[in-house]
Image (cartoon, coloured by chain):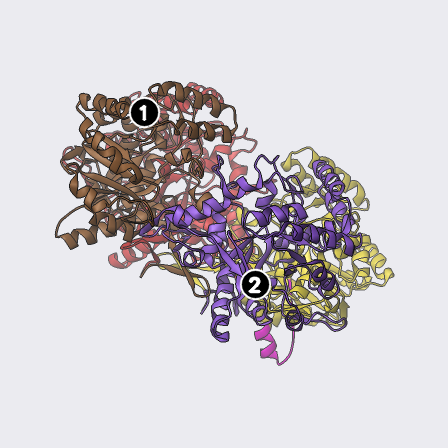
Chain colours: A purple, B yellow, C red, D brown
Amino acid sequence: MRDLVEIGMGRSARRAYELDDVEIIPSRRTRSSKDVSTAWQIDAYRFDIPLITHPSDAVVSPRTAVAVGELGGLGVINAEGLWARHSDVEDAMFRLTRAAEEDDPLAVTRLLQELHAAPIQADLIAEAIKSVRDSGVTVAVRVSPQRAAELTPDLLAAGVEILVLQGTIVSAEHVARDGEPINLKQFIADLDVPVIAGGVGDYRTAMHLMRTGAAGVIVGYGHSSGVTTTDTVLGIGVPMATAIADAAAARRDYLDETGGRYVHVIADGGVHSSGDIAKSIACGADAVMLGEPLSAATEAPGQGLYWTSAAAHPSVPRSRVTVGAEAEVDLRTLLFGPSADPDGAVNLFGALKRAMAKTGYSDLKEFQKVGLTVRG
Amino acid sequence: MRDLVEIGMGRSARRAYELDDVEIIPSRRTRSSKDVSTAWQIDAYRFDIPLITHPSDAVVSPRTAVAVGELGGLGVINAEGLWARHSDVEDAMFRLTRAAEEDDPLAVTRLLQELHAAPIQADLIAEAIKSVRDSGVTVAVRVSPQRAAELTPDLLAAGVEILVLQGTIVSAEHVARDGEPINLKQFIADLDVPVIAGGVGDYRTAMHLMRTGAAGVIVGYGHSSGVTTTDTVLGIGVPMATAIADAAAARRDYLDETGGRYVHVIADGGVHSSGDIAKSIACGADAVMLGEPLSAATEAPGQGLYWTSAAAHPSVPRSRVTVGAEAEVDLRTLLFGPSADPDGAVNLFGALKRAMAKTGYSDLKEFQKVGLTVRG
Amino acid sequence: MRDLVEIGMGRSARRAYELDDVEIIPSRRTRSSKDVSTAWQIDAYRFDIPLITHPSDAVVSPRTAVAVGELGGLGVINAEGLWARHSDVEDAMFRLTRAAEEDDPLAVTRLLQELHAAPIQADLIAEAIKSVRDSGVTVAVRVSPQRAAELTPDLLAAGVEILVLQGTIVSAEHVARDGEPINLKQFIADLDVPVIAGGVGDYRTAMHLMRTGAAGVIVGYGHSSGVTTTDTVLGIGVPMATAIADAAAARRDYLDETGGRYVHVIADGGVHSSGDIAKSIACGADAVMLGEPLSAATEAPGQGLYWTSAAAHPSVPRSRVTVGAEAEVDLRTLLFGPSADPDGAVNLFGALKRAMAKTGYSDLKEFQKVGLTVRG
Amino acid sequence: MRDLVEIGMGRSARRAYELDDVEIIPSRRTRSSKDVSTAWQIDAYRFDIPLITHPSDAVVSPRTAVAVGELGGLGVINAEGLWARHSDVEDAMFRLTRAAEEDDPLAVTRLLQELHAAPIQADLIAEAIKSVRDSGVTVAVRVSPQRAAELTPDLLAAGVEILVLQGTIVSAEHVARDGEPINLKQFIADLDVPVIAGGVGDYRTAMHLMRTGAAGVIVGYGHSSGVTTTDTVLGIGVPMATAIADAAAARRDYLDETGGRYVHVIADGGVHSSGDIAKSIACGADAVMLGEPLSAATEAPGQGLYWTSAAAHPSVPRSRVTVGAEAEVDLRTLLFGPSADPDGAVNLFGALKRAMAKTGYSDLKEFQKVGLTVRG
């Protein structure tokens, strides 16, 4: 049984935990960082670090997708974002930066809404995909469930290798009186490429998505404190430590149910520092989807700006556009150090290795079993 | 059994939760916003949105009562407030604004106390009621238990359709050695119009109020963090998530006891954003009473000022007068969007619909069963 | 069994609660404030309000002791404080004010230490006692356990009616290898006046003090957040809600053990507003000892300054000297209103009456049973 | 069984407590400070106060090591720090101070990294050891597990009496594929001097270290809030109240297992005031390792600067360099008072004595049993 409390007579709620609520505890073994591997594999694709980029235009351009791939991670381009709608994204970013600096949050959101009102142009996104493909790294793009059926054929034709089907909350059972929602199971079965789908927030939705044939399930919706406001706007929240552990339980049960199909759990939210990456894996994730922490790289197209896709929603925006400090580190240093920053913003995956070494684990799968505490 | 803790030897207290402590969790279904209804009905009156205004003069004038009604909610005028005591409320508001800007909180409270020392004039409130009635929307006014017997005949004569009998805490059993307190059961039985009564803070008081024949029971006393200070002044608090759930339990038990009489539970407190509206319904409310969030509308008579009626108490004030930002949205946009504000202050009921859609529910009654978490 | 948690293997700690952690819940009854009594009696002395002053020189001069007595409470003069050591206390206060304004906390503490290094003069304190006695109100003074034997004879001769024997922590069993600690039981038995003793922090110490024959037991040590630093300096804390409830349990058990001797529990700490007074009684106190809240009265000798006696300790000071806002209310208004302050700083005992009325209780003894919540 | 919570399905975490979460409760006895002893002994070495210095160059120079020793504690010089690498440490400190004042945290960390990139010079550290030895106080130095085998012979030759083998996390089982990690058991058995080893964070690691033959085990890694960022960088944390209690349980079990070998538990982290020292002992520690609190002494080589050794890590720094206020107290006053500071920064061990006296305990070993509360 879950840990339930009665919030009022006959009404219970489950106790849930954020990454901030947990800490990793050292165990009786230590190990050298050199003997630690952070590699993982999804379908036929192998990666040196458990990093997938959140498909935010602020951090992923075709060029940074290549850079991330070359550094051992997976860059994901948003097929419904600025690169799919504007030929001059640099100008759009410039206008956003200028608006953001004027300290009128509504104006920034309005500009973002306006920029996303432009139509998606198939040739623009095809061109972006081609440039990534030409570099030789794995090509991944993100589509929403609403537009997946419409956009996917062109994306595949352009050379996409991994499809990320992602909305704030994606369920295997979308109910609609009118319209013809996507049948995920059929959709995935018909594709030749692996699909990573989400986000989800609980065991059942994770399990249902696994049963559609997804190769990976995303937990969370890329929320970032100070940026994302889903709780304030919708009352909905996905405490990540609990949600990751639940999805990991679904992974185990689905593995058993299928006699061996392992669906990867990708944590997308609540990560602000290298310590949070370690905690995500420790709670059961196979990889993390990073957005905001990458916005500090000199290569980030947003030049310090950050937002999640919910920021551009035409009527119910649920993310702020934030302005970071001027970036001083390149992506390689951001991921692998060395760092002179004591706050875990730099050397993100070097620190993960060190956390694993200091607690005596040599690979990600084992590290999912490390001891945890929650503050009393 | 409730969730009790022993705070000291032989002295227990109940664990109770605010709306801020809970979050809604997504379920395995999603739905389109277009297929969601937020309609509800009390007695013969049907409303598109579960909105009743808190009878604060800062947000409800006769004109805004009409606007709220036309937009699908229920506006409630305070029959003991400024519109009942002053012919030139605009001037009173102007003086309050000026006082509030001078950053002397005691002076503002004193002015409010002074403005409420003026006598209630039957013709003023009758005129206000008439202007609402003429517009064709449902007419509701609020009286206190202390003055209900005296004021109600005139209010009914003026055309009131729903009577809101409201004090900070209203009980069915007011004990007094001298004086002749109102007998609620008799009072309600003698009326031809439905009565909404409250606030209450627990199961028993809610149950007793239901047994007096009230059509709706108000939970809470319109408290708003940063505005209301009942806890600091009296030590009394009504944690809303718990109080709403308790009143919903009383509603169920009373429904069973009477073989089918459904008394509506109206949550009045703790709502600062659209997310809090969703949480109120999720905890068991049928509708919310909104005060402070409406003060941001361009039509609000207080022009950004806000206070609850306890602010004007002649000897024990329990609410501050707060000054909001200059309003930039009209009431329609405030309720239905579109919004460029990521903090849930705009598109209050569009966001409610979206929260329901994202968790797979199609009407308010079902949404009361959505999953909840509390922070570990 | 108490509510224990295991903080580490084989080491448990008790969950304990501050007044801030609890809230009073309304019950199914309400009552008129006019029908509420806040009177109580200790030994032969009857008081209209459950107020004893904390013996801080910042709030109690001989003159304010008289004023408090005339308003229905009990003023307690510190027989080891400034009035006992200096003939010109006004000048001492002036120097403290000047030092406090210079924003050098160490300098203020040093001055306070220096002022308390002056010897106690029997004639000064006798004169102070006489001036209170002449006014006709009950005369109470405070001595420390260390100096009680030495000072008490002169104090009794000067006309003291209630003796307050108070240290940060007072136990019935003071162990010492050298020196001759006071035998409390003998000391109290030999006196003709009732003794109020404390502070205590737990059931056992409270019970032992009751068995010495004390008429009242003080719970806590006058701590005030922002002023007192005992936790930081000594690691020792007395969470008041728990400590009061424990002492009330000792009161019940001692009443049973003696077949009817009722020892009063006086809460001394954690009170910052009228709501905290209500909570103290609700947790089981018979009266509250107030310090800091009284420093806002125009009659307070410290003119806004506040400190507790631990501030003047020559080597381990455990209280800051704080500077409040300029006082604008006289003592009568501070205690009984009317108030234009929404933060519970004014009308302290009018608000207590109102809290009792709103929850349906008519006297202090009954109000000790009111329902409580703790935040989940 | 430990106090476990289920953070998600099939994934549990242990509730753990920081020193800030606990408070000491007064008991029924009090005692005079004069009758309290804070003495303790490790191997043949006896100390008047349970103080070992954290080997931070910011607080321990050869000269302060002597001063600490003469005042009854044990100073520990870092054999891998600035005194081992630079002949002119004063100049290094001057450069650090200047960098710290320029408000560019990265620059300070970079300078610290650069200063630690200089080679260790055997003659420099030998000279430092000699100067301490000449003074007649006990000589202790710290080495890391990585360099212990290489550096120890010279250190012993120079006259070290107690060896502190310390890393952020030290385990008895360091696993490595290449390299030849130190065999702690063999290493300690071969030495003629007692070894204090750590830090550890849990029962098992503490137990394993005890079994290597260590005379003392260090709990924690000298973390200091505002300074240390291990949780942010690595996700790893050692809540001290829990960790100390666990290590104390290991001490008891090892004592039983060996039929009488008592290994001392030394708490190294979470201490910011004298109250935290008392809490550390109360949770089960035999002594505390102090770093930051000593940086306020006029004799501290860092002149107010503070950092822990993790600040100088070449690629994953995990500590800030902080700048304190200008020191006004000498070391003797810092340790023994008198104090005019109400915040527990001065008279650190006088306050410990007072805490023991006020709760009725006469020595450290008994005080480990004092009652504790945790905030509800």
Residue on which the image places disc 2: A216
> What is the x, y in percent for residue D328?
37, 21
> What is the x, y in percent for residue D137?
19, 26
Residue flagged by tag 2: what amino acid is it?
A: Gly
The quarter of the picture where residue A196 lies is bottom right
- Is D17 located above or below residue B195 in the figure? above
The chain to which mark 2 is attached is: A
Q: Is C76 displayed left or right of A215 in the figure?
A: left
Q: How many marks?
A: 2
Point out which mark residue D83 bears.
1
Q: Are marks 2 and 1 in contact (CB under 8 Å)?
A: no
Q: Residues within 10 Å of mark 2 (few under 14, many from 20)?
A: many
> What is the x, y in percent for residue D57?
34, 28
The chain to which mark 1 is attached is: D
> What is the x, y in percent for residue D29?
23, 44
- Is D102 located above or below residue A152 in the figure? above
At x 39% / y 49%, what residue is drawn?
A35
Point out which mark residue B217 bears.
none
Residue flagged by tag 1: what amino acid is it?
A: Trp
Q: Residues within 10 Å of mark 1 (few under 14, many from 20)?
A: many
| Residue range highlighted in magenta | B252-266
- Location of the N terminus of chain D (image quadrant): bottom left
At x 27% / y 55%, what residue is drawn?
C10
Q: Is A240 displayed left or right of B365 in the figure?
A: left
- Is A74 located above or below residue D285 in the figure? below
Q: Is C180 displayed left or right of A18 in the figure?
A: left
SS type, badge 2: strand
> What is the C-alpha distance between the residues marked 2 and 1?
53 Å
- The answer to whether residue B175 is seen in the rendering is no
